Image: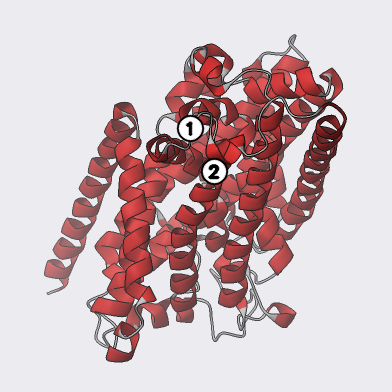
Amino acid sequence: MPGTSGDAGGPGADGAADTAADGDGDQDSGAPGALRRTLTFRDLVVYGLLFIAPMAPVGIFGTLQAVSHGAVTAVYLVATVAMAFTAFSYAQMMRVAPGAGSVYTYARVGLGEGAGFVAGWMAMLDYLLIPAVAYLFSGIALHALVPSVHQWVWTALAVAVTTLLNLWGVRTAARVGFAVLAMEIVVLAVFVVSAVVELVVHGAPRGWAEPLTGEGGFSVQAVLAAVSVAVLSYLGFDAIASFAEEAGGRGGRARGGPDRVARAVLTCLAVAGVLFAVQTYLAALLMPMSAAELAARPGEQGAAFYATVDASVGRWLHDLVAVSKAVGAAFAALAGQAAAGRLLFAMARDRRLPGAMSKVDTGSGVPRRALLGAALVTLVAAVWAARRDDGLDQLSSVVNVGALTAFGLLHASVIGWFWIRGTAAARSVPRHLVVPLLGLAVVVAVIAEASAAARAVGGAWLVVGLVVLAAQYRGRARAGGERG
């Protein structure tokens, strides 16, 4: 297959192959198998923030508050810095290989085809299950508002609506997504203003510095333990990289696309970090119970944010936040489904998955079959979980392992490209070694904190991927022998 790490030409051969796949660098969507370069910087940031969701901490606020001993805002500040290492590695590699496929493409370029397949395979687990979790959140919220309709029906309906938007075209989905994102930010702004008014009029039930220092003193161990959970709030900003092939410069041209995507990744992470810190700081100040009391009542941790809003501001804001989360979760899944489709498309185009998924629809300019494949898997997982009492726990326990493993290979790819395969000039830049090593250390630490069930599922998925990879190599070797 063209573009392997063993091709003549040494470092850069893979990157050249990826660039060639995009055309001459100035093409739009005229070439068969090419995605349209129509996404603007705003579109990319919208997709990233949709996938993350501006109010992502709402669901795990109580857990983080309890685990960190009340220093929930410090947890998000540390988590933002930790994820910045991963954002840096994405920014470096997307300039080297500006094609669809995200971490699959980067690992393939920096480490070789085998590592690229493993990275894509592990990222696939994340990209297929995170949307399923988001759809389930939407179904749960809508079922709470309309109990007469079962949550699995709402879940399936959310999948259908967002899949149709994705099939309509990436620009259409981005426009609708922008409206939904604007709604979420408005609701968040309403919460911030209401919380500030409440604090000014009635004061804070606890110390102003407590969300940063914790109750009874700052605990490094407690904050780091909570960071391993908070990092999950950021999973999704990396999905922006999957649209690298559809981000163009002026006039839809390729020139400037990689820089635009890199800036979007970093911008998305920074904006999310600020939004997360602000909302958790205000919610922690308004908490009606202490972190110790919350830790002693684990059953109340999931609804802690809603309970805080209800007790301090009123039921109206509680319902407004719930509706926003229901709609926002569905569109977070839309962005995740779109990213999964691009990953399947890129792997199919490189003959790592069935070739039918590498086709681009001439009307909409999207990889229709890859999107439908991703939607089908997500629909089955989401509806299955929606019909089980423990479905949410089952899905949530495994979504992070695939992404974190892929992040680890991403950091290794930076080292591989710039330090192992690179020139002396490339190796003279310390940040191309130090930052990826720090990012790799963070990934290993977070995986170590994952549940045994999550590690088991991730390990099993990895083993299946290695079997598939071995079968592909065996098939290609046999085909080569027959031609010989």
Q: In which quarter of the image is the N terminus?
A: bottom left
Sequence order check: which comes first, mark 1 or mark 2? 1
Q: Could you tell me which residue is drawn at 62 percent across and 58 percent down?
A: 270
Inter-mark Cα distance, 1 to 2: 9 Å
- Which amino acid lies under the numbered mark 1 shown in the image of this protein? Ser
Estimate the x, y position of residue 320 in percent, counting from the top left.
Answer: 82, 28
Q: Could you tell me which residue is drawn at 48 percent across and 32 percent down?
A: 68
The tag on residue 74 is: 2
Crowding at mark 2 (Cα within 10 Å: few <14, some 14-19, many 20+): many
Q: Could you tell me which residue is drawn at 40 percent across and 41 percent down?
A: 220
Look at the numbered discs 1 and 2 and tell me whether their residues touch, using CB distance below 8 Å.
yes
Q: Is residue 30 found left or right of 317 in the rendered image? A: left
- Which amino acid lies under the numbered mark 2 shown in the image of this protein? Ala
The kind of secondary structure element at disc 1 is loop
Q: Nearer the viewer, residue 318 or 379?
A: 318
- The answer to whether residue 364 shows anywhere in this view is no
Estimate the x, y position of residue 153 in percent, counting from the top left.
Answer: 66, 20
- What residue is shown with label 1? 68
The picture quadrant where one finds residue 435 is bottom left
- How many numbered dots are placed on residues in this image? 2
Estimate the x, y position of residue 44 in percent, counting from the top left.
Answer: 66, 62
